[in-house]
Image: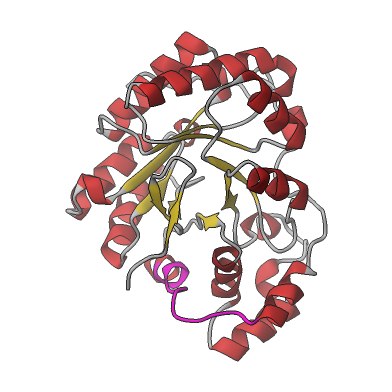
Amino acid sequence: MTTTNLVLNNGVTMPAVGLGVFQTPPEETTTAVAEALRIGYRHIDTAAAYLNEREVGQGIRESGVPRDEVFVETKIWVTDYGYDETLHAFEKSSAKLGIDQIDLLILHQAVPTSFDRTIAAYKALEKLYADGKVRAIGVSNFMVEHLTRLLEATEVVPAVNQIEMHPYFQQRDVVALDAAHGILTQAWSPIGGITFYRDGEKSTLQDETLLRIAKNHGKSAAQVMLRWHLQQGRSAIPKSTRPERIAENFNVFDFELAPDELEAIDALDTGVRGGPEPELITSDGFGRVIPEA
C-alpha cells in the first residue's frame, strides 16, 4: 500500500502520514522506526528535545530503506534559539541523525516572551534552506499572533505549522491562517492521545460518534480520526511503539469518510487544549540543554 503524499509550498513532496516518536524512549525508538519503515511509512517525525534523534537515524539505517526514500523531520528546541545557536543546533541534529540534509526542520515553540530570539532562529533556518542543508523549513505550536509576527519579520513562508490537532481540539483560526498563506497544517496528537494520557478525562478513542463511524467502515476510532485529517488536507504524525498499532495507524488509505461523517467529527470540537499553552513557553521554564552530538 502506498502512502498519500502532500506537496509543500516550495514544491517538496512529503508523505502525509508519519511516525511520531514523542516520549518514545531511546531504547524503543530504533525498533519502532525500523518497524514503521518495514510496514510502509516513509516519514519520521522527531525533535532535538525528544533526545532520540540518534536512535531514529539508527532505525532508518537498520530498516534498509534507502535514505532518499525517507522524509526526516526534526525540531530545534527553545534553548538553542538565536541565529548562531540554531545553526549549531542543526549540526547537532544532523550528526545525531547521521544525515547530511534534513528534509524538514522546524522551530519547536514560538517563545513569545523572547520573540526576537525566535525570529533569529527562523532566520538561521532560512540560511540553512538557502544553503541546501534542509529541504524545507517550518514552525510548530505557532498560534495566529505568533505566525503573523513571524511572517512580517522573515522572508521564507513556513512550509509547515505542526500543532495539537484532533477532533476535540481543532484550532480552526490557526488552520485558516495556515491555509491563507499556503502553510500545511500538521497534526501532533492526531488521534487525541493527549486526551487519554490524563486520568479521568474523556478519551477520543471511546467517543460514541467516532466509534459509530468506525463501525460503519470496519475500522477503529484511531483510523477514522487519521482519515479525517487526510481528507481535510492535513499531515498527521501518530505515535506508537507497538507493531500492531504502528500498522493500524498506516492502514488508512483504503476507505473514505462521507461528508456527513466529516461534519459529525467536526462537531466534536471542545476548544480545550491538552498540551501546554504556547503563550507560557519560555526558555527558562522549559529550559533543556540539548547535548552535543
Query: Which residue is located at x 21 percent, y 54 percent?
Result: 63
Q: Which residues fall within the magenta stretch?
A: 247-258
The quarter of the picture where the N terminus appears is bottom left
Instruction: Give left or right: position of 15 versus 263.
Output: left
**Per the image, is 249 magenta?**
yes
For the question of whether residue 141 can be seen, the reply is: yes
Residue 191: quarter of image: bottom right
The quarter of the picture where the C terminus appears is top left
Q: Position of residue 95 (x, y in %)?
A: 28, 26
Q: Is residue 82 above or below residue 74?
A: above
Q: Is residue 110 above or below residue 261?
A: above
**Per the image, is 184 magenta?**
no
For the question of whether residue 81 can be seen, the reply is: no
Q: Position of residue 150 (x, y in %)?
A: 65, 25
Q: Is residue 121 above or below residue 38?
A: above
Main SS class of the magenta portion in the image? loop
Colouring convention used in this rendered image of the protein:
secondary structure
Total numbered labels? 0
Query: Which residue is located at x 54 percent, y 80 percent?
Result: 256
Query: Which residue is located at x 42 percent, y 68 percent?
Result: 250
Q: Position of residue 102 (x, y in %)?
A: 34, 34
Q: Nearer the viewer, residue 75 or 139?
A: 139
Query: Which residue is located at x 32 percent, y 27 percent?
Result: 132
Instruction: Give left or right: position of 126 versus 190.
Output: left
Instruction: Give left or right: position of 188 versus 14.
Output: right
Q: Position of residue 172 (x, y in %)?
A: 75, 53
